[in-house]
Amino acid sequence: MKIEWNKVTWYSKLIALALFVALPFIGFYYGVQYGKIAASVGQTPVISAAATSTIGGTGTSYYSDPAEWQIDANNTTAGFSIAYPLDFDTQDNYSATPSTDWRLDTNAPGIKYFMLTVPRAFEPQTNFAGATLTVGASGNDAAVSDCMDLGEGVITSTTTINGTSFNVFMWFDEGAGNEYAITSYRTLHAGKCYVIEYSLHSSQIGNYPTSYDLQPFSEQQINSVMQNIVSTFKFM
């Protein structure tokens, strides 16, 4: 049988009609499948608002819930553990040689075991310049003898942290347009002076052009976070 391709017949019309009806559905189906494959290969993961509501911004519940934080207890020779938010930088100095920077107001040598840094971005568009928290200890005779020295013009109080009594000292320092609010927790333990200190660094808003539109940082907010960190300190 010889097929005449250029001749219109009843069955060619039927085939053409079937294709006319079916092709849009076939094209739609494969288009959907292609879209699913492309999405699974090339899409960027999206974190929902609910997943980020407890971390990554000041004042959120993450910073007031130490149970969700990282615990630093890497070396038993340091004699303590402390917890901190994961998005703060930390340094451990368990094997460091004695130095005088383990505590702010002493020339006696000691070990600065732990240091935490809060970046300026923690309170954006403010005059907040950063904060640091350190934990140090010293068995040096001079360091032990003046561990509880109040000094002049220092605000003092006492507090108990996980069963250990601490004297709390507060003072302020400033210079060259910078201001520092310092809080120092001190106790004598196992023949050593242990000190937990944090310093809040801010700059004077008047030093910046008004176009920067800086607002005063919330000292209460950052103080609350730092005190939460201090509250996790435990002797091991």
Image (cartoon, helix red, strand yellow):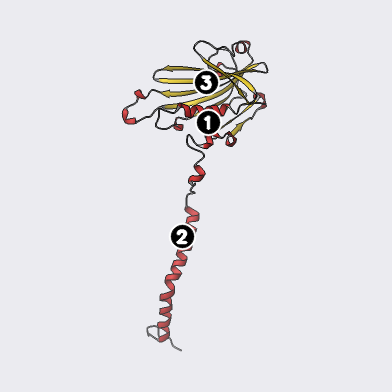
Amino acid type of the residue tagged 3 in the rendering:
Thr
Mark 3 vs mark 1, CA separation in Å: 20 Å
Q: Residue at x 50, y 36 (%)?
A: 60
Q: Is residue 172 left or right of residue 135?
A: left
Quadrant holding the C terminus? top right
Splitting the image into 4 quarters, where does residue 193 fall? top right
Mark nearer the viewer, 3 or 2: 3
Mark 1 vs mark 2, CA separation in Å: 42 Å
Residue 98 image offset from top left, x and y in percent: 60, 17
Which of pointers 3 and 1 lies earlier in the amino acid sequence?
1
Callout 2 crowding tier (Cα within 10 Å): few <14, some 14–19, many ≥20: few
Which of pointers 3 and 2 lies earlier in the amino acid sequence?
2
Mark 2 = which residue? 35
Mark 1 = which residue? 89
SS assignment at label 2: helix
Mark 3 vs mark 2, CA separation in Å: 58 Å
Which of pointers 1 and 2 lies earlier in the amino acid sequence?
2
